Image (cartoon, rainbow, N blue to C red):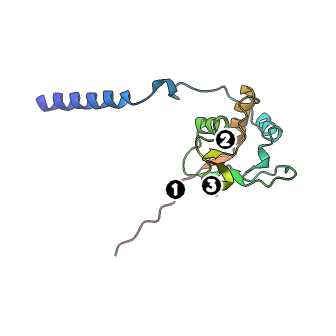
Amino acid sequence: MKGMSVLTLLLASLMALSACDQDRTMSERGFRLPEGNATAGRETFLYMHCNQCHTIKDEQLPTVAGFEPFVELGGSLTRVKTYGELVTAIINPSHKLADGYAEDLVSENGKSKMYVYNGFMTVQELTDLVMYLQGHYEVVPPQFQYRVYP
């Protein structure tokens, strides 16, 4: 009985200590923008000239003269591309740089080369764009190759 009390106290202490390191003012808990419109999001994608640098998997988009898109969005992933990740990628592009591309292609001095639209994009355009992008990701189970032992 005493061992159970000590274990409970230890677990409660660990949980309290781990909470001390978190900045609650920057928590994404409870944050959700309203639903957007995917059709309007496609128009936002084109209007904001996202297609200068981005393509969308399995979608034909017009090209922008003088630019060759090099970062593909959408496609199959082994985990969900969350709403928060897409919002963050749009409003804070230096937060996480695109994987699988040459660093000098997507960044300069550690900062994303992506234009920051925060002063120009409305919240409605942001929510529409996120809705449009989310529809182009497909979650697939990861493929594992297990070694067969004799």
Indicate which disc, 3 or 2, sits on the residue closer to the N terminus.
3
Locate the C terminus by quadrant. bottom left
Whether residue 125 appears in this view of the structure is: yes
The residue identified by callout 2 is 134
Asked whether the beta carbons under mark 1 and mark 2 sit within 8 Å of each other, the answer is no
Between 61 and 102, the residue placed more toward the observer is 102
Q: Quadrant of residue 89?
A: top right
Which of the pair 96/58 is nearer the observer?
A: 96
Q: Which residue is mark 3?
A: 103
**Which disc is residue 142 wearing?**
1
- Determine the CA span between mark 3 and mark 2: 25 Å
Lateral position of residue 150 relative to residue 129, left or right? left
Give left or right: position of 5 versus 50: left
Is residue 1 among the parts visible in the rendering? no
Q: Nearer the viewer, mark 3 or mark 2?
A: 3
Name the front one of labels 3 and 1.
3
Looking at the rendered structure, the kind of residue marked 2 is Gln
Q: Return the residue found at the far left.
A: 2
Q: Residues within 10 Å of mark 1 (few under 14, many from 20)?
A: few
- Say if mark 3 contacts mark 2, CB within 8 Å: no
In the image, what residue occupies the spot 59% across and 35% down?
84
- Provide the secondary structure element on which disc 1 rests: loop
Earlier in the chain: of badge 1 and badge 2, it is 2
Q: Quadrant of the N terminus?
A: top left
- The reply to whether dot 3 and dot 1 touch (C-beta < 8 Å) is no
The front one of 108 and 92 is 108
Residue at position x 29%, y 32% in the image: 14
User: Residue 27 in the image: x percent, y percent?
Assistant: 50, 28
Amino acid, disc 1: Pro
Residue 108 screen position, x and y as percent:
65, 49
Hey, what amino acid is under mark 3? Glu
